[in-house]
Image (cartoon, rainbow, N blue to C red):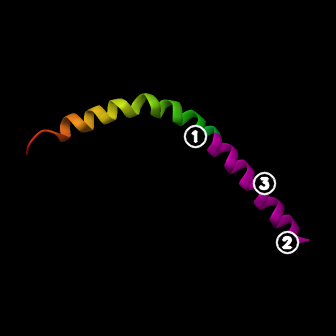
Amino acid sequence: MELLVHNLLSLAFAVVAMSILMRTSAVLVPSLDRVAPKYLKLVTSSGSSPL
């Protein structure tokens, strides 16, 4: 019985973690689309300067 309760709690925890991860990634991906071009431009422009 304890094993069943433990498995159910683990399953519930996994479902909650997955839903949080999916919501977080759904929020982050559009913001990354806006930030990535600016970051790439910054990296390529500063990386081309000689030392």
Label 3: element kind: helix
Residue 36: which quarter of the image? top left
Image quarter of residue 27: top right
Determine whether, in the image, residue 9 is placed left or right of residue 21.
right
Amino acid identity at mark 1:
Ser
Q: Is residue 10 left or right of residue 27?
A: right
1 or 3: mark nearer the eye: 1
| Residue 37 x, y percent position in the rendering | 36, 31
- Residue 25's disc number: 1
Q: Main secondary structure of the magenta part?
A: helix
**Which label lies toward us, 1 or 2?**
1
Residue highlighted by disc 2: 3
Residue 40, position in %: x, y? 31, 36
Please report the residue visible at 85 percent of the width from the left and 71 percent of the height from the top: 3
Farthest residue toward the right? 1
Q: Measured from the top left, where is residue 41 in percent x and y? A: 28, 32
For residue 19: magenta? yes
Closer to us: 2 or 51? 51
Residue range highlighted in magenta: 1-22
